[in-house]
Structure formats: structure tokens, C-alpha cells
Amino acid sequence: MNGAESMLQTLINNGVEVCFTNPGTSEMHMVAAIGKSEGMRSILGLFEGVCTGAADGYGRMAGKPACTLLHLGPGLSNGSANLHNAKKANSPIINLIGDHATYHKKYDAPLTSDIVGLSGPVSHWVKSVESAESLPRDALDSVTAANVQPGQIATLIIPANCAWDDSIEPLPREDAPSTPCVSDDRVTDAAALLTNGKPTIILLGNMGLTEKSQCIVDKIAQVSGARIMCDTFTTRLPRGEGRCEVERLGYFSEQATEQVKGTEQLIMVGTKAPVAFFAYPGKASEFYPEGCDLHVLADANQNAEDALTRLCTALSASDLAPRKIQRQKQGAGSGELNQFTVGQTVAEFLPTDAIVVDEAATSGAGSFISTATSEPHDWLSLTGGSIGFGLPTSIGAAVACPDRKVICLHGDGGAMYTIQSLWTMARENLDVCVVIFANRKYQILQVELARVGAQSMTKKTLDMLDIGNPDMNFVKMSEGMGVRANRAETIEEFNDLYLDAMRTQGPCLIEVILP
């Protein structure tokens, strides 16, 4: 058994079942090993950023890592933007990066690069394999690293000869690392803050945002009067009927500072104190009032559910019933075609337990607002700000949850970064409905142009933010990659197309032409 075969079986033994791949010559023995295996599903992406984004979506929904198989430093670099998003999401991912054979590196061949250096910024754990015999142990260590809660990115760099040389037998399953609990002092201090009568916000993220955590923190809010909020961009947010109400922090500093105005205490659970995405002249970078007391109940990698349970007990709130959202429908959208009428329709016909992947940017608020009281669903958002996340992440979510409908809400500019994802959706026959909001411009950048004080609104300036000359045709692009597609220019057309998509299995795309 060679190194690649032993490594692969070790991964399979430890629960890794899916590989999103775009391989090259240095990965051929790993490709061959996957080809012989019955325990590893391989999914081809036409661009490495599709593979890494898909692994992000899979990790968010499966709660365990998939692996990527990428070609040397350039392959890793092509996938780094979505690995950045995944790292900010704390998604579990194992990157298998092929490298030149150990004895070939001295020749500085054209594809030679500093893979370790490239891996560091987008990984929590990096290891370069030294021999075929050590490869299975290194693979098992990568699984352990990826499974550190709530999830980590582990990058394993595998020289080609370590894959083709003889190796040891595959290693058996090992238990995932336990998640550390917070100290009693953290809980006691939080209880004291919540009983002193001061205006308080409990800010949730990561493991603090699970459905169970939401129910516990709602009980805490009932006895303390604290407000429950979450980060602007979240890894996975359970929403809708049967879940508890959680207010999302606004994106712009003007929104967020108004939301938290008057707050004297901020308790973080599974997240950190909120700050602005960017600096703006004359605007605050910190999204909390000056002098606000900050308390971390649980860090992102600590057991938030346990911490909240102990806090709930300390406040004598355990016997309360959580206040769960009741389903309320407002009907399908009518009138003008815009993000809000589209959002009404998205909510009206949203299937139970759907997964919504949101990279709609300036066009997404309507759907988020309308779905608050719709069927139970999960909402996945752009945690790292690197666009081109939505389409690949939808692939991973659909692979992880094949019995759940995935709706991908996407801006037209961002979709072009990883448009190759449509081909993979078609190849794997994934149940994904893509809604493209086509305003034919980088709308968010036009907003930001004014907000940062760069007031040059000349044609030359605006042309750098305009993608409407020529207009892109997502219907033709989609059909060219095997995904059925239609265009909606009225809300009535969108209603019919979206309802049909919700009733039909398989990938489809709806291009919404915004006025």
C-alpha cells in the first residue's frame, strides 16, 4: 500500500467522506487512490476557489471536514479567497496540497513555491509531510486539527514521492478533541452583570448561535431583560418558525451604533466584540458605546452551550419556556420587481428546512427580513467578506444535506468570481436554486465610494464600478454549463419561476433583472 492509499483510508476511517478536487500532476497518486476507494466521494470543480468554497459549505452544514485536493502553491492560491472566508467562519476543512517530490525541489522547477508560507494566512494548522511512512499519522493529525471546535482549517502538504512510496497500514479512528468549558468565574461574572439592572446585549456567534443555544439564551433574556443579537455575518444561523428571535447587527456603522446606543454592558458568546468592516473618516470603528463593559462568556472555541446552560441555571431561568417564533406569511410579492417583493416570494414558498446561502450584498435585505417568520431554515452568510463565496458554498451545503433545498441569493458581480460552480451543480445534479440579482453594477462599491469620502463621481470613476457594458446574460451562461435557467423581468414572472423551482429537484437559475 502506497502513501496515498494509506492516507486516504486513514481519512475515511476518521469520518472524512468527500473530496472537492482540482488536481494536477503532483496529485496523481492521490487521484488514483480515490479512484480505487468506495469510501470517498470525489467532486470536481473547474476552479480551486469552487473547491475551497464548497468545502466551507460542507463543513458548515455537516459539522465535520471534507477535504480539498489542490495542485501546489498556485492551486492553493487560487483557492485562498474562499479559504479566507472559511477561516473566518471557523469551518472544518482539510486541504491536501500536492508538492514536488522531495528530491526534485532543489531544481526550482516552474511550479516550485513556498507552499508553507502561502498556507499560513488561510490555515490554523499546517504540516509538510516528510515520508510515506509518516503520511498516515500526519493525515490523522490533520483530522484532529480540523475537528477542534467550532472548526479549523488544516493544510497537509504532500510531496509526490511521499504519495507513491510504500507506507504503513492505515490508522484507525480516533476520538475528536473535546471542547473546553469556560471557568466558573466567567459564568459568575456574567450572572452578576445580568442582575445589576444595566442595559445589556448578549452577542452570539458560532456555537453560541445553535438552535439549542438560542433557546437557552432566550430564557436568560426573559429574566434579565438583556437584548439578544448576533454578528452581522454568521457561519450558520437557524431562523424561522420554532426558533428564537435574534437581532442581527447592522453592517454600516451608522446602523450598528444606533442599534446598540445606550448599551452599558456587552456579553460575548462564541464571538468577539463587534467592529466595523472598514474604517471611515469621522466614523467609529467599534460597534459599542464608549465606556461599555465587555465580558466574554465563551470564546469561539469554547463550549458555548454548556456556558449558557450554567448561566441559565445561575439565573434560575432553566424552567422557563423559550419564546419561539410563530410562522406568519405575508403572501407572494406583487407590484414592482425589487429585492423586497422578491424577498416576500422567497419567504412565501420557502421549503421547510431549506438552506439559504446569502451573497446578495445590497439586494439581500428584502429576503432576510421576509423570511424571519417563514418555515424553519438555516442562513449562511459571507463571514470573511471575500466575494465569490455563495455559489461554491451552495455546492457544499447541498452535498452535506442532499434532502434539503438550497437557495443561493447572489449578486451578479460576485457570481462571476466563481461562475464555474454552475457546472459542478449540473454534474452532481445538486438541488440548488440560484437567484441572481442583476443590477449590472458593483452597487455596494458605489455606496462605499461616497461613504469613504472619495467624492469623484466622474464617468471614469463610475465605469470602474459598472458591469453593465456589455450586459451579462446569466441565462445563457447557466445553460452553457448544464443548468436550466430563466429570466424574470416582472415580479409575476419571478413568482412563477421560483415556485416551480421549489417544487422541482435539481439545479436551476433565475436571473432577476432589477430596474
Image (spheres, helix red, strand yellow):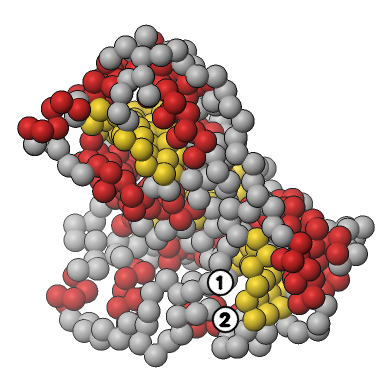
Q: Quadrant of residue 191?
A: bottom right
Viewer-side residue, 491 vs 498: 498
Q: Which is more toward the observer, 200 or 426?
A: 200
What residue is rendered at 51% in x and 61% in y? 233
Q: Position of residue 42 (x, y in %)?
A: 40, 24
Q: Which mark is residue 438?
A: none
Mark linked to residue 273 = 1
Q: Is residue 459 left or right of residue 192?
A: left
Residue 319 vs residue 467: left or right?
right
Asked if disc 1 and disc 2 are in contact, CB closer than 8 Å, the reply is: yes
Q: Which residue appears at 30% of the width and 23% of the height?
A: 131
Residue carrying label 2: 288
Quarter placement of the C terminus:
bottom left
Q: In this picture, is 464 found above or below 291? A: above
Instruction: From the top left corner, tell me how far across and down residue 177 is, in percent.
Output: 60, 39
Q: Earlier in the sequence, mark 1 or mark 2?
A: 1
Give the residue furthest to the bottom: 282
- Above or below residue 155? Residue 296 is below
Image quarter in which the N terminus is found:
top left
- Number of other residues with Cα within 10 Å of mark 2, as a class: few under 14, some 14 to 19, many 20 or more: many
Q: Is residue 325 left or right of residue 260?
A: right
